[in-house]
């Protein structure tokens, strides 16, 4: 036994009793003989022989320290979870922060032990630091937001009431998040399949093993979805590997081009002149726009449901009777056209991929979401026949050359704003002048074309006649002699008649 073996035994004993970091209270002579260097100290015996003298026992020491670290960390995790269940006061650390602290501590201790028992080298230490910095660790590298912390705390508080089942659920959820971190290179469809399989497995396990009632299973699944999707949102919503953003821009451009569509064209049974109905329409538009600000699929569905209920109320107030499905869908289309929600296609795809399937297939949330998908599909394929318009009018409206006629002045309510009335009147007048100008220009072009064709036709006819009957100039004929004059050259003419007198 050499002179440093007693110190190594005391070091292990101190590790067992206190759980401290190995680098505390280290004899400087031991560092010297291992070839380690400090800030103000250079080893006088930095040689290969000294390095290999004590490196032969390195594996034995590491085999002892590594299980101790893992056992201590596991015991701290179990004690922390047990204390969080029994304590009714405020919890100082959430499970997410505890996991982060645990990983930080484990990484720091392992790195310290490795550096302590390995030969020091400036090149080697720099390589180790670079590899350590590149090592993937989702809980360390990710900076949790305020909302993530709040959702984590709510999730832990919710699982407290389930005791052992809650601990198992939390363990499975954390394992799933860690697995999803290493699956980010997969396509979004494959990540969606993994999430749906996780939902199904957890629900089946609670029903078969935990004997949890279906009502509580649904509540637990809602909380699980909220917890995991809040953390995965920025990685799986509108990812760059898909064409979701391209579809968003296309539908936004399409809706802007259809700004001229009126409720009458869609047969919408809503009278916005009624103040209460107008308020319902505004609330419905606000809800459908607010959908983009939510991070959890269930919350996005809740916005769609609230929007739909406001639509039903508006129809009921207008018609004084309950609304039907035939009235609801055209009104929903009108609300989408009027609101033009941001990232509409991305939100629909996100809900379809990562929402709890039981919620989409059953209940009012799934019904309203299906109608929204139908409304978007109708808008994408909207044509002149859908609006009972001629193709010519539809093309003019789409190109912005003109717009449908607005309300007549006699149909305005008494309390309507005078400025709005005048604005619509001016727009109507401009629309009429534009149509009149277009008709005049069309007729003028037609007249010009007819004149050109008539001139060309006349010139052609004249040319044909000239070619058919060419002009010939003959010499003039000799003038004839007067009958009463003396005819010298021609004696054959009879003499002139003489008057005769008869006596009676």
Image (tube, rainbow, N blue to C red):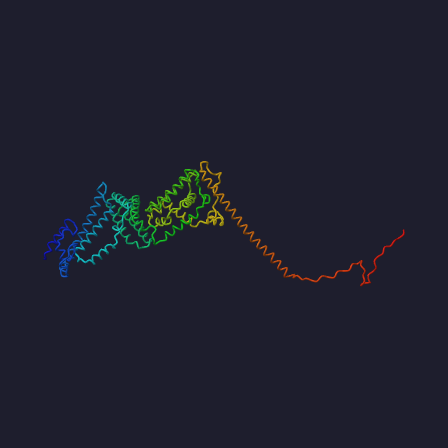
Q: Quadrant of the N terminus?
A: bottom left
Residue 470, by quadrant, is bottom right
Q: Is residue 118 left or right of residue 336?
A: left
Residue 56, by quadrant, is bottom left
Q: Is residue 51 left or right of residue 384?
A: left
Residue closest to the eye, 354 or 380: 380
**Residue found at the far bottom of this picture:** 489
Locate residue 266, reporting x and y percent: 45, 45
The residue depicted at 18 percent of the width and 55 percent of the height is 115
Q: Is residue 16 left or right of residue 340?
A: left
Locate residue 265, reporting x and y percent: 46, 45
Locate residue 119, reporting x and y percent: 17, 58
The residue depicted at 81 percent of the width and 62 percent of the height is 488
**Residue found at the far top of this picture:** 414
Residue closest to the eye, 447 or 65: 447
Numbered circles on residues, count: 0
Q: Is residue 225 left or right of residue 59?
A: right
Residue closest to the eye, 219 or 478: 478
Locate residue 383, reporting x and y percent: 46, 49
């Amino acid at each position: 036994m050499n002179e440093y073996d007693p110190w190594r035994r005391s070091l292990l004993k101190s590790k067992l009793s206190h759980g401290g970091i190995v680098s505390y209270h280290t004899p400087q002579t031991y560092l010297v003989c291992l070839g380690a260097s400090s800030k103000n100290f250079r080893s006088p015996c930095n040689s290969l022989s000294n390095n290999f003298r004590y490196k032969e026992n390195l594996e034995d020491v590491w085999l002892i320290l590594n299980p101790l670290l893992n056992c201590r960390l596991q015991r701290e995790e179990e004690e922390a979870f047990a204390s969080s269940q029994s304590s009714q006061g405020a919890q100082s650390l959430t499970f997410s922060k505890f996991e982060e602290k645990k990983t930080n501590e484990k990484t720091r201790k392992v790195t310290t032990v490795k550096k302590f028992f390995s030969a020091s080298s400036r090149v080697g230490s720099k390589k180790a630091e670079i590899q350590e910095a590149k090592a993937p660790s989702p809980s360390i590298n990710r900076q949790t937001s305020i909302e993530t912390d709040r959702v984590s705390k709510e999730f832990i508080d919710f699982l407290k009431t389930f005791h052992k089942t809650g601990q198992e659920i939390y363990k499975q959820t954390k394992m799933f998040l860690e697995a999803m971190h290493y699956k980010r290179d997969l396509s979004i469809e494959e990540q969606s399949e993994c999430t749906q399989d996780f939902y199904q497995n957890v629900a089946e396990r609670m029903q078969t093993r935990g004997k949890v009632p279906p009502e509580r299973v649904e509540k637990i699944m809602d909380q699980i979805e909220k917890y995991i999707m809040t953390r995965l949102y920025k990685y799986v919503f509108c990812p760059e590997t898909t064409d979701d953003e391209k579809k968003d821009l296309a539908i936004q451009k399409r809706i802007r081009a259809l700004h001229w569509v009126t409720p009458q064209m869609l047969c919408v049974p809503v009278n916005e002149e009624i103040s209460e109905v107008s308020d319902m329409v505004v609330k419905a538009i606000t809800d459908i726009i607010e959908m983009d600000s939510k991070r959890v699929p269930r919350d996005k569905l809740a916005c769609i449901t609230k929007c739909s209920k406001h639509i039903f109320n508006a129809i009921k107030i207008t018609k004084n009777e309950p609304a039907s499905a035939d009235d609801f869908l055209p009104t929903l289309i009108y609300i989408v056209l009027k609101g033009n929600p941001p990232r509409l296609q991305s939100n629909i795809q996100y809900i379809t991929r990562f929402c709890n399937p039981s919620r989409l297939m059953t209940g009012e949330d799934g019904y309203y979401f299906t109608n929204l998908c139908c409304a978007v599909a109708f808008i994408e394929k909207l044509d002149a026949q859908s609006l009972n318009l001629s193709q010519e009018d539809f093309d003019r409206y789409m190109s912005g050359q003109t717009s449908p006629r607005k309300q007549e002045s006699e149909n305005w309510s008494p309390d309507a704003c005078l400025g709005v009335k005048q604005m619509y009147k001016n727009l109507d007048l401009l629309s009429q002048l534009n149509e009149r100008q277009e008709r005049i220009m069309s007729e003028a072009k037609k007249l010009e074309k007819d004149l050109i064709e008539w001139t060309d036709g006349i010139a052609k006819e004249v040319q044909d006649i000239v070619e058919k009957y060419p002009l010939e100039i003959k010499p003039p004929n000799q003038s004839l002699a007067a009958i009463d004059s003396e005819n010298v050259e021609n004696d054959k003419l009879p003499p002139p008649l003489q008057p005769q007198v008869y006596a009676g």
